[in-house]
Image: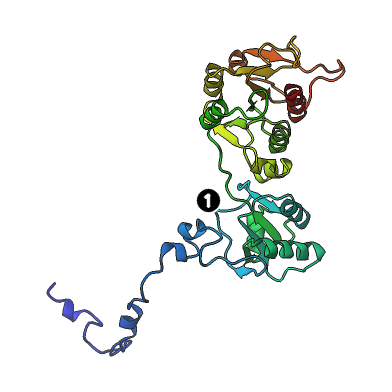
Amino acid sequence: MAGNSQRRGAGHKGKGSTAGSGGRIRRSLEGKGPTPKAEDRPYHKAYRRRGPDEPGRTGGGKPKSSRPSGDGKGRLGAANPDLVFGRNPVLEALRAGLPVKRAYIAEGVERDDRLRDILAFAAEHGIPLLQATRSELDRIAGGGVHQGVVLQLPRYEYADAADLLEAALDDPGSGPRPVFVALDGVTDPHNLGAIVRSAAAFGAGGVIIPERRSAQRTAAAWKASAGAAARLPVARVTNLNRTLKQYAEAGFTVVGLDGQATCDISDFPGRDGPVLLVVGSEGAGLSRLVRQNCDALASIPIANAVESLNASVAAAIALYELSR
């Protein structure tokens, strides 16, 4: 616009004005080289999705300084269920054979025999170790007592219930007939892990859980299964009742555990063929729709003084009976 040249400081020397920046402003606007790739930027989600064997990760035994990050789906913290922290739990998890994505070690942490065993195990098995400040580990552990060490487990890869059914029909295996376990309302991850362990012990083909109102494959469930989850598939379905109907149409007898049922678990109709055992929660038991989609309801005889069994105990007893 006309007259702009007459504005104060625009081409006129005076009080407070300078002759020029000497190129300082121009140099500050110059580029700093090509932008690094997303997977090479530590705080980018693409970097956080990189696997432990990709360049930039550190092998076991030698911590690498890095800001703790998530796995591409939200930051780590109290809401992340795939964490194990505290020296004893971490050491037990490693010895139990839990899969580990990476481990975090606090900077300058005091070392004792347990931590030395953890570092030795990580070095021997090639587990990536990342260094973090104590405040960062506090954030990761959600305020829990981490004692300077945190394990992050990989996100569990669920099986497909339809694929399990197809595989069972094509190859029933060495047992007399295929057996699967479905859970309805079991929300305790320790119960889920224990049921997976029992299912593996008694030759079941897999465990089926719903996406909602159910325990999921968390670190606690991994630990409770004592490594069985690495051998036995767990399928997650959006609609449990639809899956029950699908298995029933394929020739499975869908039997639900019910403490009030008059039929004994050792003698329900169809027990000699393929069976889908449905276990409900300790409190509410089987939901109404699930009960309606069961071909039979069976109970485990117990003393009258006891109202019910823990879900994982009931599942183990029923699986034992089916395996006989």
Q: Is residue 44 visible?
A: yes
Q: Residues within 10 Å of mark 1 (few under 14, many from 20)?
A: few
Query: Looking at the picture, how far across and down is residue 80, in whole percent?
Result: 61, 48
Q: Which one is in front, 29 or 244?
A: 244
Vertical arrangement, residue 186 with respect to residue 230, above or below = above
Quadrant (top left, top right, bottom left, bottom right) of the N terminus: bottom left
Query: Looking at the picture, how far across and down is residue 262, in whole percent?
Result: 75, 9
Q: Which one is in front, 242 or 189?
A: 242
Task: Please state if 249 lies on the left or on the right of 96 as rendered.
Answer: left
Vertical arrangement, residue 256 with respect to residue 81, above or below = above
Task: Please state if 5 lies on the left or on the right of 59 as rendered.
Answer: left
Which residue is rendered at x = 55% and y = 55% of the image? Answer: 70
Quadrant (top left, top right, bottom left, bottom right) of the C terminus: top right
Residue that badge 1 annotates:
74
Q: Which amino acid, mark 1?
A: Gly
Q: Is residue 211 visible?
A: no
Which residue is rendered at x = 68% and y = 16% of the image? Answer: 271
Could you tell me which secondary element the residue under label 1 belongs to? Answer: loop
Q: Which residue is at the far left?
A: 2
